[in-house]
Image (tube, coloured by chain):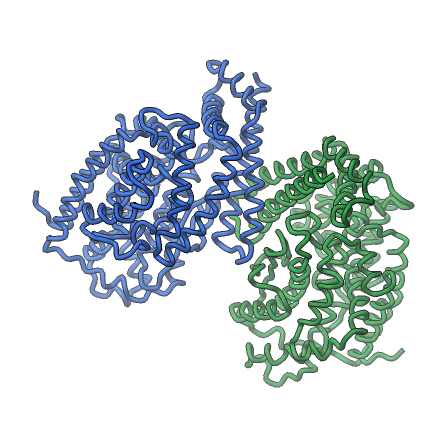
Chain colours: A green, B blue
Amino acid sequence: MKDAIKQLNDIDNKLHAINHAQAIIYWDAATGAPKNSVEGRANTLSILTGEYYQTLVNETFDNLLKELAEQKDALDFVTLRKVEEFRNEYDKIAKIPVDMYKAYTADQAKASVAWEEAKEKSDFSIFAPHLEKLVDYNKKFIEYRGFQKHPYNTLLGDYEKNLTTDELDEFFSELKHTIVPLVTKINASHVKVNNDFTKLSYPIDKQEALNKDLLKAIGFDMDSGIMAKSVHPFTTNFNRHDVRVTTRYFEHNPFSAIYSTIHEGGHGIYEQNIGEALDFSTLGTGTSMGIHESQSRFFENIIGRSYPFMAYFFPIFKEAFPENLKDLSLYDFYLAVNKSEQSLIRIEADELTYSLHIMIRYEIEKLLIENKVLVKDLPALWNKKYEEYMGLIPENDAEGVLQDVHWSEGLFGYFPSYALGSAYASQFAHAMRKEFDLSEDLKKGDFSRIKDWLRTHIHQHGRLLNPSEIIEKTTGEPFNPKYYTEYLKEKYSEIYKLKD
Amino acid sequence: MKDAIKQLNDIDNKLHAINHAQAIIYWDAATGAPKNSVEGRANTLSILTGEYYQTLVNETFDNLLKELAEQKDALDFVTLRKVEEFRNEYDKIAKIPVDMYKAYTADQAKASVAWEEAKEKSDFSIFAPHLEKLVDYNKKFIEYRGFQKHPYNTLLGDYEKNLTTDELDEFFSELKHTIVPLVTKINASHVKVNNDFTKLSYPIDKQEALNKDLLKAIGFDMDSGIMAKSVHPFTTNFNRHDVRVTTRYFEHNPFSAIYSTIHEGGHGIYEQNIGEALDFSTLGTGTSMGIHESQSRFFENIIGRSYPFMAYFFPIFKEAFPENLKDLSLYDFYLAVNKSEQSLIRIEADELTYSLHIMIRYEIEKLLIENKVLVKDLPALWNKKYEEYMGLIPENDAEGVLQDVHWSEGLFGYFPSYALGSAYASQFAHAMRKEFDLSEDLKKGDFSRIKDWLRTHIHQHGRLLNPSEIIEKTTGEPFNPKYYTEYLKEKYSEIYKLKD
């Protein structure tokens, strides 16, 4: 058995190395590669993907996994989890015919190009035939892979293990009943948040210095990670000692960079605090999209847009840009980063309305997989839902159904994790508050207890625990959206002086 | 046979992809990776190296190469060359026992660490036992691989195919007889070059802009490459559309960056102009260290330190730093970049004395391989040779035998290509001058004819032609060091007003 475990670890380590190589190529593409490098990168990435596939899917490895699974009571926990996770991944990939998967990858690439053009010209018809293909592929994948109760569950499970439409229907229904009326009331509120000072000039070099200090302050280790610039902020991790985050700067909107930094910092801190036992293993990373997003949203919103944090950050910000903040009070500063309004663009949405954007995408994806809507009818459906939930109608498809990159990459079932993450974050915060008073730490800019708590309960486990296991172990109950809806109600009722 | 060629190309493409992944990891390490990333990088690189080895060295591939070699008259030229080159590489690696090679790699890593410490403390004894090991390994490798006439030839051939100690003995003997007396005469010359203006302040941001423009001007394509900063300037290439060069800036020495940029630009332009037929093949890169260095030295010295080039560049430089160049004439400017003096440090040496540094290393390496000197006696031997050829004795080992990184990486047989490159460059320049007058183009800052000529004769061939084939085809004769010695004699006699 010792020998079998060594073989397993060697394969795990090799897959980890291939992931590392691919991730660094993507990182490079986003942060520095020259314009004409596209083709060479695609060639190398496709060879590495093929190598990953061949390393994972073959009879020898299949047999090794079976052999180890038969002796599972004798396995240590880490090995057991590896066997389970690889079995999962193996079956997921092996059930789909290789040729179909290759054709899918090629069609994905074409769809991405078509989506870019379609968005640029705001013409959904350019993207529609490609999207149809990608949806069809995913339906076929579900057929091959099988499903429990609802076909969409198979896709959801790729990003959030065991997540079901039943849970999500309930979750989004709660959200709808909380957020939609709140948005209407905020619209009618006498409180009008003035954030004009955020539109003044904030020199980029000063912003850069401020964001770097901020990233360090919240607990990101600059010896085991770096921060760079990219068009869209993101985080990537090669191992816990090499985690990369990016942000982007706008001269007339300093909070764009600041909240990107805090958000990506949350992802990055998660990855830097994975347990040492998982070094160079594919299990040595965040356990799911939803849990990952819970960490970024926890830092960005629960902490980063809280009053105590603003009390800490206000003098720092003021010192960096004294001319722009002459007569501003701390409370104005706090209000400015919590301004809520109906919006059409997901990535520009505020904390409150963000989940409505996700809900719309969830409902549409479910209908697509259920064959209840045709791709050609998506723009109309999209606009109808935005009118219903948000009270706004997009003027064109570029700011409507074409706004997100995800579908062009075949990512269906991914969006819900964004909203789940926010809800998980509230549930974690509730559990944390039982142990200590966050506010006191935040006011002082002391993030050490918070970071320790997150590491102990969440980060260190990597993929050793599933999302639901982490939530139950950490908070003492299964996922419960009421912590999120109550948090939102309380926060926004207070800000906008709403009455029940 | 069609099938066999496809198999060959697939393996070639895979090896190319592994090279790409490794190169980008090295690039990242030199340009941005965080401090603690060392271990993760080492792990991934060693797995990729293992994958490269397994892809290349196995019975199936061995048989494929044999099968294709048997039908070599029916092969197209590119395929034929692939078969030859892979056969070569296969035999080179396969003859060495895997375990020995692994131990070597591990000992190399330790030697690098020891060398850094030894250099820092200027204490050769820290490095000596490691160097002994590396020398012993290389001697054993030669035993396994066999050799023609002289054991050192096997190592030389790794960097410059078919190069022999006979040729190098003759080459360096000619150099010695030319350069050593020239250096003595320059020492005694009444011409004293004043380069005080180069020690004024040159703000880094202005230097950066100037160097970027310069790199573009000489013909480096910024859509198919980038320039970054690193501690030691270098060039790396993933494919002809993705070539990376670095430079470094010193506020009080603008010519350090400028000549690094031109030098690395020469390497980079070579890689960007490899023929399309070699895309994604391991043959799609420069053919040898020597030919590569001929391109960088051609740009750096033959062009970059020539009077016509300085006539073009002087006004540009003056516009960037007008305060620092008030009373300077073009001729003073030209003299400043051609100042020659005896020196102890190779990488700071001027064009004339540079090859003396290489000669000393060549002589020592040869003695090591011939068992005619012991590692422990190297510092004394080093100092003796510097006194003899350069008229200077190092004050300590850090500025003596410990100055270069190469031996700590097991690179023996590599140094000579630096000097060869300069000599090749002179021979190429002589051939080029038969076709057109470089001076006219350089004065105008028009590098297009020069670049076309280099592409046609040298760059496009990639590894399809060996160094000696390129030299003969391009210049009509075998390598002939007299073009180099005559060039040096003429140039420096004129600058320093020397009489025969």
The residue at 79%/42% (across/down) is A88
Residue B166: % across, % down: 26, 29
Q: In the rendered image of this protein, does residue A285 appear above or below residue A326?
A: above
Query: Within the image, what quadrant is residue A68 found in?
Result: top right
Residue furthest left in the image: B499
Locate residue B180 relative to residue A401 in the image: left or right. left
Q: Is residue B422 visible?
A: no
Query: Within the image, what quadrant is residue B440 found in?
Result: top left
The residue at 50%/14% (across/down) is B71
Q: Nearer the viewer, residue A140 or A71?
A: A71
Residue B17: % across, % down: 55, 37
Q: Nearer the viewer, residue A468 or A196?
A: A468
Residue A428: % across, % down: 79, 66
Q: Nearer the viewer, residue B222 or A265?
A: A265
Q: Nearer the viewer, residue B315 or B39?
A: B39
Quadrant in which the C terminus of chain B appears: top left
Q: How many marks?
A: 0
Locate residue B291 relative to residue B276 in the image: left or right. left
The residue at 73%/64% (across/down) is A456
Q: In the rendered image of this protein, does residue B242 appear above or below residue A313?
A: above
Q: Is residue B176 visible?
A: yes
Residue B208: % across, % down: 40, 58
Quadrant in which the N terminus of chain B appears: top right
Locate residue A154 relative to residue B137 in the image: left or right. right
Q: In the rendered image of this protein, does residue B39 appear above or below residue A431?
A: above
The residue at 59%/84% (across/down) is A326
Query: Within the image, what quadrant is residue B167 found in?
Result: top left
Locate residue B304 relative to residue A479 in the image: left or right. left
